[in-house]
Image (cartoon, rainbow, N blue to C red):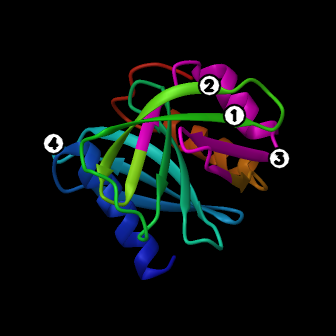
Amino acid sequence: MSKLARILLIVAGLTLTNGPAVAEGFKAGMWAGERFYAKSGKFSRCLVRKIYQDGTSLGFAINNFGKVEIWLWNNKWTLEKGKKYNIQFGVDYLRRRYIKAKARTKTMLSFIVSETRTVFKELKRGQNLYFGNANKTVLKYSLKGSSLALDKAMICYASAPDRKSVV
């Protein structure tokens, strides 16, 4: 795992756990994965991520409540930390979902998926994930390898202490 990727994962853990995160890494094909713990030592999430040619990292996490989170970060972005952004996302030709993603930092957005089971299956089976915003900007990311990555994230989650429920 590159130094930059490791730093981004630690920042993701710090952002959502409100303190230093402890991470345990694993590989999932072309995706990298981490299990994060909060400062208190309790399980926080299992995250898998892939870095794309445009510099964007796409991550999928299963948090301690069994909910799927989607993460996007890119060092070129200049988001307003704490602001919520209206975006839409969808897998392949399937239904688009409209959500509010929160800027965790000036370069990172994340949101929790309300239809966890359905979206989890779509992400595993899909070819591409699309994001759009009010400016009609469309981002397209290949989901190649996501099935294995999400399987590994589920194994990570299932073996985690302090988890609340099952996806």
Taking the magenta stretch, the answer to whether it contains residue 136 is yes
Which labelled disc corresponds to residue 145? Answer: none
Q: Which amino acid type corresponds to the residue marked 2 in the rendered image?
A: Arg
**111 or 152: which is nearer to us?**
111
Sequence-wise, which precedes: disc 2 or disc 1? 1
Q: Earlier in the sequence, mark 2 or mark 4?
A: 4
Q: Is residue 19 left or right of residue 74?
A: left
Q: Residue 166's x, y, as percent?
A: 53, 21
Horizontal side, residue 56 vs residue 79: left or right: right
Tell me the residue that label 1 is attached to: 90
Q: Which residue is mark 4?
A: 40
Measure how far apart labels 4 and 1 are at the Cα level: 35 Å
Q: Confirm or deny contact between disc 2 and disc 1 (CB under 8 A).
A: yes
Relative depth, front residue between 77 and 14:
77
Residue 127 is tagged as 3
Residue range highlighted in magenta: 110-139
